[in-house]
Image: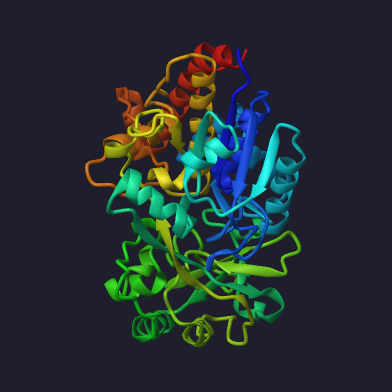
């Protein structure tokens, strides 16, 4: 079999996973990344796999949707999980990482792999790049940060209209400027004496409504004439929540559930949670506080939060454009383009939402490319698995809407009479998780392992 070479455009989470997956199986990879030429407005560091919005890779609980997905990614040799675990910071049941160390580790591993050639280039035309670098296949994994040149090519040659929505970034504060006398450490649904990885700022009813009113009335960054803000429902700006209703945030990121009472024995009306940005605990991000507020207003309004009256912000929040395709219309189930079968898409650009979801699609696309290289037909992951459920979702949803992995995407299970009498929700999760693990293991043994021999 003649040596095949794969072009991977984008060294984000999905591109990094795809490049390493193939390289570890002796496939030559040309990894093209444009941020090393010029950072876009949402990027802060020049290294690969930058976590832009938050430092959390979500739950590690084996009975959660994210836990199921991580189990599958780990079985496929996920670079993201390897580096994430190596540079983890305390976050309860979640996997949160030191962003800069995590990114640097991934960059180092990719750059040092002898089967990967890293090229600093603002990609424009994948067809021409394939010819230039003598590649047989391409994986486009530019995610939410696709540059204008490549985006223009995709819109002209592949997608047409409806190619974006908007997301927002949460601010990060300097830990030394927080008033810890008004805050306490506690994870949700754990005893107070156990402490916790999340720093909580409780609010009274009066404080909360005053804060929400300030959010709703604060000055926002103005939408441009050419923009059409389409926010992902599970990642709404905190100020947009305030505009939707005075109690919206209290039933979302500011919910006090599982956190009362605080160390003074008081039950808060609402809570703002902060999570460590690094192991030193020198910086914290405001969980769920993505925002459209102007920088000046962010400082004014967020200092209304108890404990943040004199907070110094290491960086403030902002909105940025996220690009994604109508997968059902434009892609095959192996994530190859219907118009250009040698071009695959991976990551958030396919229509999934979230760090691990995007990374998993990098593994999925690379696996399919590997099968093609070895002369094998594409194979669909079972819908009972997390990866299979994600692909099934983006390939069947009538109106494209990015989604995280969740139990609603997985087939339900029937409970026996005995199981029905207990904690039905918990039991269903355990059964769905057990089934997903078993189905994936069988599928892996029958399809993936044979493919990788």
Viewer-nearest residue: 63 or 20: 20
Determine whether, in the image, residue 419 is placed left or right of residue 3: left
Identify the residue shown where x is 49% and y is 51%: 124
94, above or below 61, in the image: below
Q: Residue 236 in the image: x percent, y percent?
A: 38, 64
Q: Is residue 261 above or below residue 391?
A: below
Depth order, front residue of 339/203? 339
Q: Can residue 386 be seen in this view?
A: yes
Quadrant location of the N terminus in the rendered image = top right
Q: Quadrant of the C terminus?
A: top right
Which quarter of the figure has residue 185? bottom right
Q: At x 49% / y 20%, what residue is drawn?
A: 372
Identity of the residue furthest to the left in this view: 398
Expressed as whole percent of the image width and height from the top left, the position of residue 134 reads 59, 32
Residue 30 shown left or right of residue 150 in the figure: right
Query: What is the quadrant of residue 244 in the picture?
Result: bottom left
Vertical relation: 339 (above or below) 349: above
Q: How many labels does the image show?
A: 0
Colouring rule applied to residues: rainbow
> Horizontal placement of 448 versus 209: left or right?
right
- In this orientation, does residue 346 appear? no
| Residue 135 falls in image quadrant | top right
447 relative position to 30: left or right: left
- Please tell me which residue lies in front, 3 or 276: 3
User: x, y percentage for residue 280?
Assistant: 76, 63
Q: Nearer the viewer, residue 400 or 416?
A: 400
Image spot of residue 184 (x, y percent): 62, 70
């Amino acid at each position: 079999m003649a040596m095949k070479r794969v072009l991977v455009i984008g060294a984000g989470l999905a591109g990094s996973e795809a490049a390493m997956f193939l390289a570890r199986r002796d496939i030559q990879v040309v990894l093209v990344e444009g941020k090393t030429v010029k950072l876009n407005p949402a990027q802060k560091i020049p290294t690969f796999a930058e976590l832009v919005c938050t430092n959390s890779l979500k739950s590690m609980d084996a009975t959660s949707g994210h836990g199921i997905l991580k189990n599958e990614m780990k079985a496929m040799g996920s670079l993201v999980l390897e580096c994430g675990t190596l540079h983890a910071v305390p976050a309860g049941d979640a996997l949160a990482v030191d962003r800069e160390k995590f990114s640097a580790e991934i960059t180092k591993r990719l750059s040092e792999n002898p089967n990967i050639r890293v090229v600093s280039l603002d990609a424009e035309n994948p067809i021409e790049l394939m010819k230039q670098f003598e590649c047989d296949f391409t994986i486009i994994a530019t995610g939410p940060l696709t540059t204008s040149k490549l985006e223009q090519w995709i819109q002209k040659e592949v997608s047409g209209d409806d190619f974006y929505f908007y997301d927002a970034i949460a601010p990060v504060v300097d830990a030394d400027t927080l008033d810890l006398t008004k805050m306490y450490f506690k994870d949700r649904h754990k005893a107070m004496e156990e402490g916790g990885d999340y720093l909580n700022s409780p609010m009274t009813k009066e404080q909360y409504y005053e804060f929400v009113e300030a959010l709703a009335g604060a000055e926002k960054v103005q939408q441009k004439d050419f923009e059409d803000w389409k926010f992902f429902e599970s990642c709404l700006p905190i100020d947009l929540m305030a505009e939707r209703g005075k109690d919206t945030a209290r039933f979302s990121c500011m919910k006090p559930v599982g956190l009362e009472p605080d160390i003074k024995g008081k039950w808060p009306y609402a809570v703002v949670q902060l999570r460590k940005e690094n192991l030193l605990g020198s910086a914290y991000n405001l969980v769920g506080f993505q925002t459209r507020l102007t920088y000046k207003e962010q400082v004014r309004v967020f200092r209304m939060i108890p404990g943040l009256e004199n907070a110094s912000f290491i960086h403030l929040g902002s909105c940025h454009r996220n690009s994604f395709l109508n997968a059902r219309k434009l892609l095959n189930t192996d994530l190859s383009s219907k118009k250009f079968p040698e071009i695959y898409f991976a990551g958030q650009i396919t229509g999934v939402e979230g760090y691990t979801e995007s990374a998993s699609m990098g593994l999925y696309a690379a696996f399919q490319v590997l099968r093609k290289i070895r002369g094998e037909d594409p194979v669909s992951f079972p819908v009972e698995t997390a990866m299979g459920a994600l692909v099934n979702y983006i390939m069947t949803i009538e109106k494209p809407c990015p989604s995280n992995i969740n139990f609603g995407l997985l087939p339900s299970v029937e409970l026996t009479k005995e199981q029905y009498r207990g904690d039905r929700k918990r039991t269903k999760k355990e059964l769905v998780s057990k089934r997903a693990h078993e189905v994936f293991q069988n599928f892996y043994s029958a399809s993936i392992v044979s493919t990788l021999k």
